[in-house]
Every structure is written in structure tokens, then in C-alpha cells.
Amino acid sequence: PPQPTDTTSGAPLVTVPGIFAGDTTGFTDDYGDPSGCTNYAAAGNDGVFAIAMNNGDSVTLDLLFDPAIDASLYVSDDPAAPDTNCVDGVDALVGGSEQLVFTAPATATYYIIVDSYDAGGSPFTLTLSP
């Protein structure tokens, strides 16, 4: 299965349905301000996947993260500034898990950012379902 990249550059294209495991531990905090979508900053190391979607397509993203870390999950169509230009996101649960149902507002390649409010990284599992 594809592994996430540290930035949007070279992010692997994933498809629905799919289960993708990764680890942000060796990555850096490239994207730190998804507050427009999540209401919180994200100081953690981030991992990135890409997904091609048509206008109106929906995907459910389920993220399982270290339960001691406040996970963050957001989606952007801007590879240059995916955090400040995110189109949807969630940072609702303290304790590692997040779920986001995303509907594409336009036909585009979107970037799925696995991040966290807390500094550092964690192994994770991201499940995509229709």
C-alpha cells in the first residue's frame, strides 16, 4: 500500500475504498495552521496522501492515531498551502481518532493531511470508504 509523504510534493494517490497505514514520527511539522477547517492549530508532524475526486463525490475518512495524541485531519486542494487553504477538516476528539465525511466541491486532486494538535508523530491507520 502507498505510504504517506511528508509534504504534498509526491504524495501518493489513494483510492476508495482503502486502508492505509503510515507513521508521522519521522516527518516534520510542515503544515501548522488548518484552523480555518479544524478550529485549532496543528503542531504535529504531518503525513500526506492525494485523492482524485469528481464534483459531488463523497468519501468517509476514519483516522486511528495514538490515543495519547490529539489527532487532526484535513483536506485541501492547494498543494502550496494545504493548511491555510484547507476545504474541510476535523479536530474534534481528544484521544487519537477522527472521522471526516468529505464531499468534493469541484473536480480536483485533493490532499489528505494527517496531523495533530500535539507536537510529534505517531503510527496511524487511515480508512477511506464511500
Image (cartoon, rainbow, N blue to C red):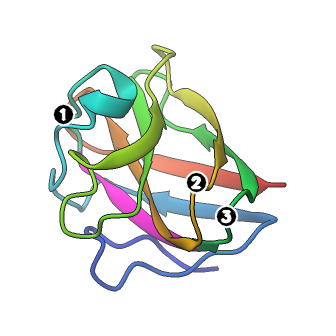
Callout 1: few (<14), some (14-19), or many (20+) C-alpha neighbours within 10 Å? some
Q: Is residue 97 above or below residue 75?
A: above
Callout 2: few (<14), some (14-19), or many (20+) C-alpha neighbours within 10 Å? some
Q: Confirm or deny contact between disc 2 and disc 3 (CB under 8 A).
A: yes
Q: Position of residue 15 (x, y in %)?
A: 71, 74
Point out the stretch of residues depicted in magenta: 45-51
Q: Give the total of numbered labels.
A: 3
Residue that badge 1 annotates? 119
Which callout, 3 or 1, points at the residue further toward the start of the chain? 3
Residue at 43%, 24% in the rendered image = 91
CA distance separating discs 2 and 1 = 31 Å
Query: 36 or 46, which lies in front?
Result: 36
Q: Quadrant of residue 74?
A: top left
At label 2, the amino acid type is Pro
SS at mark 2 in the image: loop
Residue at 35%, 47% in the rendered image = 86
At label 1, the amino acid type is Ala
Q: Is residue 122 left or right of residue 22?
A: left
Q: Position of residue 83 (x, y in %)?
A: 25, 47
CA distance separating discs 2 and 3 = 5 Å
Residue that badge 2 annotates? 105
Q: Which mark is residue 55?
A: 3
Q: Quadrant of residue 81?
A: bottom left
